[in-house]
Amino acid sequence: MIKVVVVDDHEIVRKGIIAYLRTDDELEVVGEAGSGNDGMKLVMDKVPDVVLMDLMMENGTGIDATAEIMRTLPDCKIIILTSYYDDEQVFPAIEAGAFSYILKTSSAEEITDAIKKAACGENVIEAKVAGKMMSKYRTAQKKAHDDLTDRELEVLICIGNGMTNQEISEKLYIGIKTVKTHVSNILSKLEVNDRTQAAVYVHRNKLIQ
Amino acid sequence: MIKVVVVDDHEIVRKGIIAYLRTDDELEVVGEAGSGNDGMKLVMDKVPDVVLMDLMMENGTGIDATAEIMRTLPDCKIIILTSYYDDEQVFPAIEAGAFSYILKTSSAEEITDAIKKAACGENVIEAKVAGKMMSKYRTAQKKAHDDLTDRELEVLICIGNGMTNQEISEKLYIGIKTVKTHVSNILSKLEVNDRTQAAVYVHRNKLIQ
DNA sequence: GGAAGTCTCAGTCTTAAGGCGGAGGAAGAA
DNA sequence: TTCTTCCTCCGCCTTAAGACTGAGACTTCC
């Protein structure tokens, strides 16, 4: 029997998953929790083989719970069960030590399958998530504005807010000549031609909103 | 007995909800579907009192299904059941004729309660969604760029992409003088001082990404 | 002590940007 | 028809922007 704990703050989802898991006689649901914190305590107490963990929970994410569980019970397999494959928390979850990552769009059979595989040490990563991981490592590239000095970044943000050189000089208490120097350096470092493109850069790279 | 149909493409969620609803002897689950299309046909066939409809489905949204059902069975109460309160589809769903709008974070009891209330003609709107509706009507205000002509909007988008007047004139096959005229008009209509601020406007108002 | 990087500022020069006023042609509304 | 709006373009003018070169003061690091 594979001992399973289900952590999900959607009661209806949790009850549903448990109801289904109970129909499989290889699995034994030894506990359920509605928050990351409760889940953590429960896991420490029950020491299950597998934890089905929802990522998006209202108070305290599944990430912290996952990390904490892995610290004390490194042999416990945590399966992240979430709704969206492009969730930003995918990577923190994997770094925290999540073993498998499946979506709620998976069929009930796929979920029980993932649990059984996890118990055998075989992990399951949703194809879409795997693809996301690939692109993640591709986009882990250096950003042009990493080359900027602190002061230059400060000036760039001003440009991104549509300020003129005059206004920037007044805001930063420096001469307009100095601002022009910074702006020139910024433009060449970002490889753009003028302040408008620099402003676009700021917004495209979400340096400000 | 209140006849209920459950439409959700997450099998595990659907099974869970149904398993729970069956424990209530006032409710009778007369069918289930894994897509908006199937759900629509099923509802036409079974004519339930209440439909529990998931919004986020992979093929065909719950919106279209809701609208279609309301056209043929206007007395049918459709309860939208979704994961997020700030979903952009909230309003289309309500316009499509959804009767209640509750979240999956609701307790199982709240869901059965919403079903019973719907059957009695009493709708339930999640507090957070209601708040969202309020702010929606507040933000339904006129945008400055609504005053722009088609051509001006076209030029504005170019500015938002960091193009110079020269580049814009080449792209639109018009003289640079004409571009300058458009730019001047745009700046005064948007009440900004220069093209950089116009570019910032474009991104802040998400005219382009 | 020297080298490198950063921040500050200066002078000069060129050009894109933008304001202001005017105007013709086309299309649609009153 | 007349009026209005939009798109197009012109000339004149002022100024902010940006490139390029140079340089002093300061900190950090070797």
Image (cartoon, coloured by chain):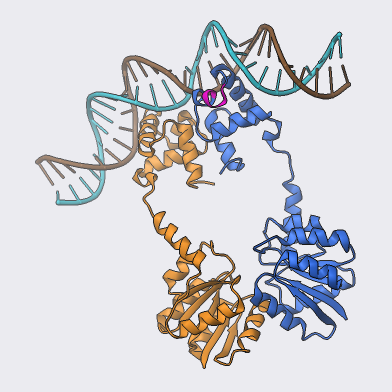
Chain colours: A orange, B blue, C brown, D cyan
Of the pair A126 and B152, the residue shown nearer to us: A126
Q: Percent from the top left, x then y, of residue C9? A: 34, 27
> What residue lies at 78% left-to-right and 76% top-to-bottom?
B31
Q: Is residue A197 magenta?
A: no
Say if A139 sits above or below D10 in the image. below
Q: Is residue B171 magenta?
A: yes
Q: Is residue A187 left or right of residue A206?
A: left
> Residue B34's quadrant in the figure?
bottom right
Q: Is residue A98 left or right of residue D22?
A: right
Residue B124 appears anywhere in the view: no
Residue B172 appears anywhere in the view: yes
> Residue A22's quadrant in the figure?
bottom right
Dominant SS type (magenta)? helix
Of the pair A147 and A6, the residue shown nearer to us: A6
> Residue B143's quadrant in the figure?
top right
Q: Is residue C9 left or right of residue A57?
A: left
Q: Percent from the top left, x then y, of residue A47? A: 48, 89
- How many dots with numbers? 0
Q: Percent from the top left, x then y, of residue D22? A: 22, 24
Say if A20 sits above or below A156 in the image. below
Say if B80 sits above or below B192 in the image. below
Range of magenta residues? B169-173
> What residue lies at 59% left-to-right and 19% top-to-bottom?
B178
Of the pair A179 and B5, the residue shown nearer to us: B5
Say if B172 sits above or below B21 in the image. above
Q: Percent from the top left, x then y, of residue C16? A: 47, 22
